[in-house]
Image (cartoon, grey):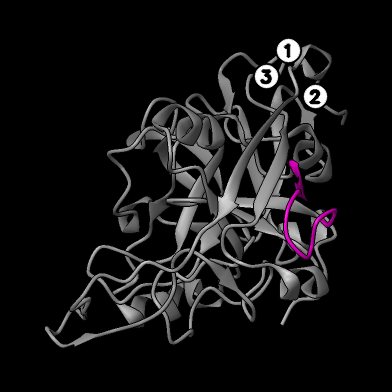
Amino acid sequence: MQSPKTNETSLVEMAVSGAITTPAVRPGQYIPHPDGTAAVLPGMFGITYNVRCGDRAFGWAGDHVEPGVSIDDEGDSGRHHALHYLNCIGNEAMVTSGLAAGARGIVIGEHARILVQFDEDAQDLMAPGDRIQIMTKGQGLALSDHPGVALKKMSPRLFHAMGIMEEAGRLQIKVAMELPVRIMGSGAELNSEYVDQDLMSGDRALMAELGIDQMRLGDLIAIRHADHHWGRSYRKGAVSICLCIHGDSIMTGHGPGILTLMTARDGEIDFTIDPAANIATLLDLGAQK
């Protein structure tokens, strides 16, 4: 086996920036359970102190819980989309204002905002409005000998950390678990470079039967018959490799969020299950709970 060749030396590295957001709760914001009851729960945007990459994706008293720090640039649509489209998982971030100025972190996900993880001491000093600069690199990354494989949101750092090898013309990738394509829900309508797709977790018995309720934030995930080249659709024989970036939801058609990293239509990707395949370990992001 050998490592696949990339065009890494041709990539452009650029700075983008955003500000730490605040949690957003609309008046009367009840989130409906599948049985019709409702609750007010925390989860999206802002600074989350006790949920980090590597922690469980299920079991929080929250909805779409985001690990780490959520940032955005909401003043201009062009800057907002540059922050989203140029960022890749594993890019380095730096705080440029506030009490934690100079602290460095890592991009760990893209939801409605960009998710960045810092060490706990730095995060304790941060406040909404603090500016974060990200050194983006990875958009345009491609495999020289595998034109049928598309890389999405993949920084060179993450690509190398995943230890991807090729054998007999196929890429060999380790993932924490496999998801059946039939449970993929909200987000199928979005392009696969922008935001995630939720899995449908409302059938709790099925989640337990398949072991999906053991998923962790930061787990690498494989989905067979899922083609994520231009959107997220069913295609027999396709394989997509994804990343769990946010926690579970009580809403019908929603659950933990899965961000696309790699996709192939014609059998170029093969995978094996390794429960340790999580970016908290691969990118050395600290202890897991």
Single out the mark in the foreground, 3 or 2: 3
Residue at 75% x, 48% y: name it.
96
**Amino acid bearing label 1:** Ser
Query: Residue 72, relative to residue 169: is it above or below?
Result: below
Residue 288 image point, x, y percent: 75, 76
Question: Mark 3 and 2 residues: CB-CB less than 8 Å, in contact?
Answer: no
Label at residue 4: 2
Q: Read off the residue under disc 1.
A: 144
> Which residue position holds label 3?
142
Give the structural element (helix, strand or loop) at label 1.
loop
Disc 2 element: loop
Quadrant showing the C terminus: bottom right
Q: Position of residue 129 (x, y in %)?
A: 57, 58
Disc 3 to disc 2, C-alpha distance? 10 Å
- The range drawn in magenta is 91-103
Amino acid bearing label 3: Ala
Which is nearer the N-term, disc 3 or disc 2? 2
In the rendered view, tell whether residue 146 sits above or below residue 93: above
The answer to whether mark 1 and mark 2 are in CB contact below 8 A is yes
Q: Is residue 169 magenta?
A: no
Locate residue 202, reporting x and y percent.
Answer: 28, 74
Q: Residue at x 37, y 60 (%)?
A: 199
Q: Residues within 10 Å of mark 3 (few under 14, many from 20)?
A: many
What residue do we see at 29% from left, 84% from top?
Answer: 40
Label 2 amino acid? Pro
* Residue contact at pointers 3 and 1, CB within 8 angstroms: yes
- Residue 23 location in percent, x, y? 44, 69
Is residue 94 rendered magenta in the image? yes
